[in-house]
Amino acid sequence: MKVDLRLVCRVLIACGALALIQLCRMGLRSFVFLFFERTIISDTLFSSIFMIVVTAVIIIVFHVRQISLSFFPKRFTLSYRLFTGIVALLFFSGILFMAGDIELILFMFYGALITPLFEEILFRGALWQSLNFKKEQTTYLVTTVLFGFWHLGYFDTVLWRTSLLFPTADIVHIMIGKVLIGLIIGLFVGALRYRNGNVYSSFLLHCLINTVGK
């Protein structure tokens, strides 16, 4: 059985890029919290800002290189409008039910809007276009697997938050669970990206899953 070295190289480069992003996040977080008190709110704010900045950088880089991220669909059909309306309704309904709790509202924006946008632009946008295998099914499967294991990179945040809120929690089982959930979500959102040819549909589904899960 012949091994496609170009495929292997692309996957290794992708793994390196993903690891670099997580290491940058960890390093910057450690530096920032040398000067500021680390609380749930400040930690969530840091993560939100980091994701927004990285998302902006990805968009700028791909724009300069004139490579489309295929974010928006070619036409906003009725199904897209309905799906967008449902997700928006659920999202803002959730915020209303939080009764002005700043911490919960911030976490809602971070978990159900900012994180899905960041991860979909990164995986179903930049990574999908960069891998660009001959068979798009291969791109779908590889990005799904990488998306699952990407969640191991959040180990530092999970460890800190569980030690703060649930000190007796089993961190190993939590991380295994995050990887498995990441793989399952990746299968569904990646299927939409593959079927519809745009990131917007996978972003909407990701938002919906995280909104309902909050």
Image: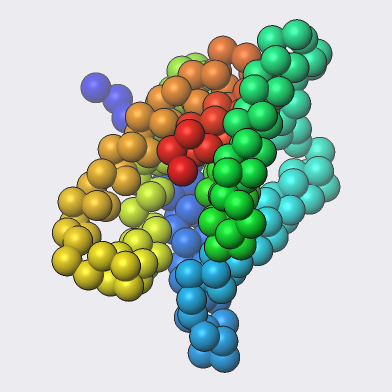
Residue at 65 percent across and 63 percent down: it is 49
Q: How is the image coloured?
A: rainbow
| Count of marks overlaid on the render | 0
- Which residue is at 41% across, 25% downward? 187
Question: Which percent across, then down, holds residue 165?
Answer: 32, 67
Specify the farthest residue to the top: 78
In the depicted view, which residue is nearer to us: 83 or 195? 83
Residue at 57 percent of width and 22 percent of height: 193
In depth, the one of 121 and 114 nearer the eye is 114
- Asked if residue 83 shows in the view, the reply is yes
Vertical comparison of 97 with 132: above or below? below
- The residue positioned 28% from the left and 38% from the top of the image is 180
Residue 11: which quarter of the image? top left
- Residue 170, given in percent of the width and then of the height, sits at 17, 59
The N terminus sits in image quarter: top left
Residue 184 or 22: which is nearer the viewer?
A: 184
Horizontal arrangement in the rendering, residue 80 relative to residue 102 (left or right): right
Q: Position of residue 69 (x, y in %)?
A: 70, 34
Is residue 70 among what the camera can see? no
Vertical placement of residue 26 versus 65, above or below: below
Q: In the shown orientation, is residue 112 left or right of residue 86?
A: left
Q: Pinpoint residue 157: horizontal percent, then vertical percent.
A: 40, 65
Residue located farthest toward the bottom when viewing the structure as drawn: 35
